[in-house]
């Protein structure tokens, strides 16, 4: 089963790559530097120039996809077909497997696999002229490349670039050693050289211990992955220990994305007298650790809030605050500053008022009326957000991005006849039938659920619900619902009800069709945005209330 999954993934990758022929904008951040620049293909600098030991002058790269620091997928890319010609390689592992997990080399004497990219990678392992590290960085951070990886591993592009994932890049050299063609990363070459007691270094010289390892290395330390930048020489042959620990790798990361807000005049629109969550994405060029005792300062509607602020180097940290909106409509701004950035948001506070339907009468008519389809006011059933957390390990602050989530669940929505209607009944499909002119009532039970690490400060409950009605074509009039117990929402009390019940009267003229009432529940706020949902239910109308009236003589 696993082999089938991998085969399908590679096929999908090839299909996506075939569409990726035009360069696109950069979407990733490349932590990549390079050096090398010595020797020449086929000459004594890259091998001994004999038929037994030489560089094949072909480029490849092992790409390992990491989520929150853990490997989820790995694949080799190459500029040319390699499967048939490569006779020896190692089971595909990455530098973190060897360096952090203590993995050992596992020989693989057949079935080497790589995916040939139609838009060729720039020269990675350079000869005498070195490589163009800026071209390499552009290639592996551009949108087409990231979309190709997304399609190949089955992770949606928006998820892959959302901040949880990283790409670990390791250049691959294809070369002939002792008459056999090999595929090796720099780490594998250094570890293999230790096994063969320096023979690889002696024969391949500048390839395996200079140009391959110096083709990529980190320009800055990655504290989350515990991988250090290279501060040594950018030319010359390197030791096996330095290659294993520092060289032959690059990292592409993606900034965590702030909550998505609907484009328009305002960044947020809230209702009056409502609890809300406002989020600000703040960034920092230099790492801000708990040792700095830093704060983000937020100002909203004349109130100031402070929150402890940490952020990795070059990262973005989401900070949020729970705020209660004013009782009167107004526009205002909310601002925050921390790290190296500030954010200003435009806020519109509006009043939600019921447009109470008129009291229906016996004389109302609407001949030829056909009810329209019930509208869907939209749903956002899940939100996610996250923040960076720092932990000190051996005196060094390490970073981890933690993701949180919240979701909306409608436990029940029921539209049913008012309890004073005594002639309703169930039909074969389970729907309730009633006569027009009687009233209906609703019961809705929405609930906000949230995962680990989320507190009540991070979410608000639902605070508003609205119903619209078919006799008004779901326009002009509505009824607000209110919370009547711990979980249940119902109509507000009807001012035209003799008993002041929580009901809505159907018009006497309503035709014999389904009476559908949509209810939208909303104003449950999280740092990742608002949770809301549209839910519908119906009763069947057959006949009218006059059918239940009997006129007779009283003696």
Image: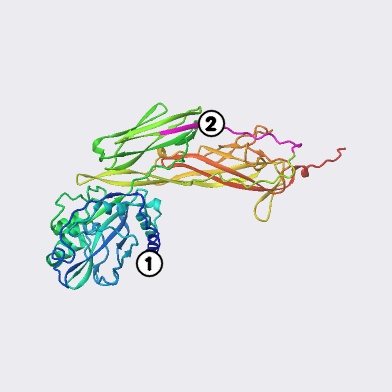
The residue lying at 64 percent from left, 53 percent from top is 430
> In the figure, residue 396 lies in which quadrant?
top left
Q: Main secondary structure of the magenta part?
A: loop
Whether 429 is drawn above or below 336: the answer is: below
Image coords of residue 375 (percent x, y)? 59, 45
> What residue sits right under mark 1 in the picture?
7
Whether pointer 1 and pointer 2 mark residues with C-beta atoms closer than 8 Å, the reply is no
Mark closest to the chain's N terminus, 1 or 2:
1
| x and y percentages locating residue 363 in the rendered image | 76, 36
C-alpha gap between disc 1 and disc 2: 56 Å
Q: Is residue 91 located in the magenta-colored stretch of the structure?
A: no
Say which of marks 1 and 2 sits in front: 1
Q: Is residue 115 above or below residue 339?
A: below
The residues colored magenta run: 345-364
| Residue denoted by label 2 | 351
Q: Nearer the viewer, residue 354 or 166?
A: 166
Q: Quadrant of residue 37?
A: bottom left
Where is residue 432? Give x, y as percent: 67, 49
Q: Quadrant of the N terminus?
A: bottom left
């Amino acid at each position: 089963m696993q082999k089938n999954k991998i085969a399908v993934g590679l096929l999908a990758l090839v299909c996506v790559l075939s569409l990726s022929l035009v360069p696109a904008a950069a979407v990733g951040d490349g932590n990549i530097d390079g050096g090398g620049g010595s020797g020449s293909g086929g000459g004594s600098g890259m091998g001994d120039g004999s038929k037994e030991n030489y560089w094949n002058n072909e480029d490849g790269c092992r790409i390992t996809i990491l989520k929150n620091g853990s490997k989820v997928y790995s694949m080799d890319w190459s500029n040319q077909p390699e499967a048939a010609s490569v006779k020896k390689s190692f089971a595909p592992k990455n530098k973190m497997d060897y360096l952090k997990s203590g993995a050992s080399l596992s020989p693989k004497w057949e079935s080497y696999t790589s995916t040939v990219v139609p838009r060729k990678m720039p020269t990675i392992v350079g000869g005498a002229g070195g490589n163009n590290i800026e071209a390499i960085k552009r290639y592996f951070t551009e949108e087409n490349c990231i979309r190709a990886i997304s399609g190949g591993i089955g992770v949606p592009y928006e998820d892959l670039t959302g901040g949880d994932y990283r790409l670990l890049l390791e250049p691959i050299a294809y070369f002939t050693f002792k008459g056999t063609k090999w595929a090796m990363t720099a780490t594998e070459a250094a570890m293999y050289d230790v096994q063969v007691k320096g023979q690889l270094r002696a024969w391949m010289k500048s390839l395996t211990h200079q140009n391959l390892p110096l083709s990529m290395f980190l320009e800055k330390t990655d504290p989350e992955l515990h991988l250090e930048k290279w501060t040594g020489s950018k030319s010359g042959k390197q030791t096996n220990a330095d290659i294993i620990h520092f060289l032959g790798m690059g990292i592409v990361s993606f900034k965590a994305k702030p909550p998505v807000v609907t484009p328009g005049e305002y960044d947020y629109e809230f209702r009056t007298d409502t609890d809300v969550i406002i989020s600000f994405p703040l960034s920092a060029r230099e790492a801000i650790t708990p040792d700095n005792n830093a704060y983000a300062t937020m100002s909203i509607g004349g109130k100031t809030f402070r929150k402890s602020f940490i952020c990795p180097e070059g990262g973005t940290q989401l900070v949020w605050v729970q705020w209660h909106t004013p009782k009167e409509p107004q526009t205002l701004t909310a601002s925050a500053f921390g790290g190296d950035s500030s954010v200003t948001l435009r806020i519109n506070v509006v009043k939600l008022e019921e447009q109470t339907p008129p009291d229906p009468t016996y004389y109302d008519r609407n001949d030829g009326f056909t009810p329209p389809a019930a509208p869907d006011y939209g749903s956002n059933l899940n939100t996610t957000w996250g923040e960076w957390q720092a932990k000190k390990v051996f005196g060094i602050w390490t970073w981890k991005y933690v993701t949180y989530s919240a979701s909306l669940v409608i436990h029940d929505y029921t539209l049913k006849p008012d309890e004073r209607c005594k002639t309703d009944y169930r039909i074969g499909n389970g729907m309730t039938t009633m006569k027009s002119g009687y009233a209906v009532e609703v019961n809705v039970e929405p609930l906000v659920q949230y995962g680990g690490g989320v507190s009540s400060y991070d979410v608000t409950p639902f605070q508003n619900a609205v119903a619209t009605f078919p006799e008004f074509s779901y326009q002009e009039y509505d009824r607000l619902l209110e919370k009547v117990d711990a979980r249940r929402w119902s109509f507000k009390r009807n001012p035209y009800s003799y008993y002041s019940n929580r009901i809505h009267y159907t018009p006497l003229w309503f035709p014999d069709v389904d009476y559908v009432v949509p209810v939208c529940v909303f104003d449950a706020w999280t740092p990742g945005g608002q949770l809301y949902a549209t839910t519908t239910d119906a009763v069947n109308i057959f006949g009218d209330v006059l059918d239940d009236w009997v006129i007779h003589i009283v003696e």
